[in-house]
Amino acid sequence: MNRPFRDLPVTRRQWMRMGALGAAAVSCSGWIEALAAGSASDPARRRSCILLWMNGGPSQMDTFDLKPGHKNGGPFGEVETTVPGIRISEHLPKLARKMDDLAIIRSMSTKEGDHGRASYHLRTGYMPTGPIAYPTLGSLVSKELADPTLELPGFVSIAPFRGLNPAAYAPGFLGHRFAPLIVGESDFGRVVPGGDGAEALKVKDLSPPAGVDLRRADARLGLLADVRDPFLDLRPGDAAYSHRTAYEDAVTMMRSDAVKAFELEDEPDLLRDSYGRNTFGQGCLLARRLVERGVPFVEVTLNGVDGNNILGWDTHQDNFEAVRRLSEVLDPAWATLMEDLKARGLLESTLVVWMGEFGRTPMINGSNGRDHYPNAWSAVVGGGGIAGGQVIGSTTADGTEVEDRPVAVPDLLATACLAMGLDPMAQNMSNLGRPIRFVDPEAKPIREVLA
Amino acid sequence: MSRFRIPILILGMIPCGAFAASAPAAGDPARGPGEPPTSGAAAAPTPDPYALAEVIDRRIGERLGQVSVEPAPVADDAEFLRRAWLDVAGSIPPASEARAFLLDDDPGKRRKVVDRLLDSPGYVSNMSTQWRKLMIPEAEGDQQVGLVSIGFEPWLRKQFAEGAGHDDMVRDLLTVPLGDDQQTNRIFGGEEPEPSPFGFVAAKAGDPGALAAGTSRLFLGIRLECAQCHDHPFATWSRDEFWGLAAFFSGLDRRSPDMALFQGREIPGRTEIAIPEADRVVQATFLDGDRPRWRYADEPRAVLADWVTSPDNPYFARAAANRFWAQFFGRGLVDPVDEMGPINPPSHPELLDELALRFAQSGFDPKFLIRAITASDAYQRTSAGYAPGQDVPELFARMPVRGLSPEQLYESLIRATGLEREEPLPPFVFGGSSPRKDLLERFAEDGSSPTERRSTILQALTLMNGQLVETAVNPQGNGTLAAVADSYFLSTREKVEALYLAAFGRPPRDEELDRLARFVDRGGPTLDPKRALADVFWALLNSPEFSFNH
């Protein structure tokens, strides 16, 4: 807590309160609003989306659709939420207090149980077939919603693990312009730097290398212009000109104030503590800072509880211990994100989606784990465009089947589009010269969940 | 429920060094030793590629005359050499080659350098990479497909190294035997992947519809996908025709539809298929409407392959010639290349017919076609200039500026900078970042045509600030820059010239040389001539003249 007062409209009295509350580790209500007092809600603000991606397939039975008492239920108990009648895992207590702004979909029913293909399906809305390279949701949304004057990329992916299917994270036929800016990528064999998780979240190659100060960087750019311009003058055409534009935009970003979004150390320690001092927690904080600066799509991946885990939710063994520890990372980060967005007037315009590529078997296997289960699982939506405080659909008592209101992947993505004010039936031209709708035309949006 | 595949995880841990060596070129088991490649047109005398080059120029010239567009002049030697190296061998020329070529006064030197490049390892790897991406694009994004397709690029290398005819290559691919599930086990045991086109079937997950669509698009130049689900009101192809083609693959039997990867078997002799969600079964039928007359023990895929690759097939030779043309001009005579048909006629119909005919007569020899194309004035025109009408791409009046493939960019960077080349990792090695991997990822193709490719912010950041270029411009390093900077026998002007040759394959123009040499002598902002020279090299590597083919 070394720089608590810097640049913040917080009085000493408020600070004392914050300290007291932080130490008591109770709800952060109140003081986050005080911190956010400077940022106003802008009515003309464009919509944004934050996707919380649970890599590996999170267990619905131990998070949002518990079956206490049933033999499939496992040891976790339920906790009451702020919405009477809705109960979730006892290991998500902070989130339980945000239930008014969240809607649980307990009837996800999908068809793919392979990590790579299911990730592609959930993240693009289409199955990976043939030569059409479908764009991932973030690319689609950033193309539609990014303000042309934005000095940051319209799609930022925080701590993804793309190893099993890079195409599930790619802009596909929309092209490179809509590719995610990736920070803190996880990968096999790559250890994400430890500490509080923030170090991993810096943009790669954003600053000139050591030894190249501003004067030298300018000299280099001057030489580049000298070499480049006569070449371009003789070769008109978009491809070559895009080179100049890309370099100009890159330099703008390198030197813009907007890129300060990545300087998490500017945030008060108390707030950073509240999000959780780990990659996912700090990633959620970064997501808020990006959305605040107009980035329309940010995704934050929860890979595991330590920096070296890549499919943390893939709990074939010791499911309960793993999910408990994951919940301890998820709960404060997500709850603080909701609170922080709300306090800054950003929640009404920011859709928050929580999902993985599938759920997990209700049956507990011989290793005290749960296996892949696309048949009946849960996702959560909240924030902008969503009527929170409700549960959509249900599963049978043993959790194996969807009992009512089955929701397929296109249904979920069409709902997300509508919540962001996008028409899911609008089209983009594909790499095969065939127009492709944002979402499969079979989609039946979940109307009752839309605000 | 398919569980996460543990073997893949474990494979990821195997050190990649075990597979670094390239696959040995073994004899083709399908063909007896010493037997020449079979081709329907093999008996005809081998046509002369340079005569075909003249045909190209006559046809292109006729069209230009009709619309009164003056073509751009022929490129100078440096511009030609760089382009030919990139297109044929996948990289820019070494500075020494460029210098020697510029000094050579042999009038036949352009044809000779293409001949030499066609015999180089660069040709084999460049063509293999390009065709692998065309034939199994699925392997780019999906690591599991990449894994089961591990023998695919070695197989392509073998084809191009041995000078296989395009028809033989396609026939092998369409008739690849199944039961190749042992491939992964073999690699698992630390062995070389066996060259095999099995990846084509695997990437389509053994699905008859996907295989029909892929076959038609790649080898017949026809997009049939839309006809898979319905008769399109404006398209030529009906749903029955689509499924008639798919029926040739109907013997493929996906053992478990839940499996992401195809590990199938084949029911021999099956020649009909039920159209999904329709109450109809269709018989295997070629796209020209004919049905094969089945004989005992005919294998449907082999029968289809014979029809596809026959010199009499109206689609195959034209589709192939068009694709090779597009590789060298950035667009096809029919463009997009896989949308041939009455609604999208060729820009030069007679030329396409003649290319196809001679290509078939050559035994579908890619080198024949490449010799003809690169010897034409149309290919050798400069990319610089402004004359009216030259912008119309289908006139081929000027060489368009084209984006490099990520592999071409990497190979060119290595060549220009003199840094050590990093061997590609096999597709089953997950993880770890490396300068090569990062670069390929940032510059990955996005499905747009090379003439329409756009640069991105992240690409700019990578080249401006990234590790690869920074290492390359380190005067204390051991690459081109350090060698040039430390050469006491070179004047500043000669040093700048050496860097130009390394990066652009040409000497600097006088005004460039004057300005840059002055900058270096004054030491730039660091007041250090070595670092100023590094800044010049940085600017060259970051310029579009370096990162485009032009």
Image: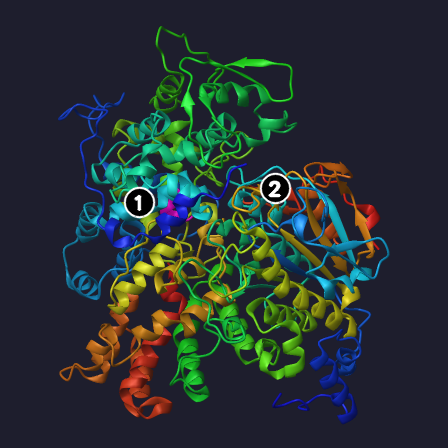
Secondary structure under tag 1 reads: helix
Q: Is residue B343 above or below residue A335?
A: above
Query: Within the image, what quadrant is residue B266 found in?
Result: top left
Q: Nearer the viewer, mark 2 or mark 1?
A: 2
Amino acid on which the number 2 mark rests in the picture: Thr
Query: Mark 2 = which residue?
Result: A361
As measured in the structure, the alpha-carbon distance from the residue carrying label 2 to the one carrying label 1 is 46 Å
How would you rate the neighbour count of disc 1 (Cα within 10 Å): few for under 14, some for 14-19, many for 20 or more?
A: many
Secondary structure under tag 2 reads: loop
Is residue B369 visible from the viewing direction of this image? no
Q: On residue B127, which mark appears?
A: 1
Which of the chains bears the disc numbered 2? A
User: Which region of the structure is painted magenta?
Assistant: B325-331
Image position of B468 (left or right of B248): left
Q: Is residue B449 magenta?
A: no
Image position of A213 (left or right of A132): left
Amino acid on which the number 1 mark rests in the picture: Met
Residue B383 image point, x, y percent: 38, 58
Image position of A82 (left or right of B323): right
Q: Residue B307 versus residue A401: which sits nearer the camera?
A: A401
How would you rate the neighbour count of disc 2 (Cα within 10 Å): few for under 14, some for 14-19, many for 20 or more?
A: many
Residue A411 image point, x, y percent: 72, 43
Which of the chains bears the disc numbered 1? B
Q: Residue B324 versus residue B108: which sits nearer the camera?
A: B324
Q: Residue A131 versus residue B208: which sits nearer the camera?
A: B208
All told, the count of numbered labels is 2
Residue A36 image point, x, y percent: 75, 80
Magenta: predominant secondary structure element?
A: helix
The N terminus of chain B lies in which quarter of the figure? top right
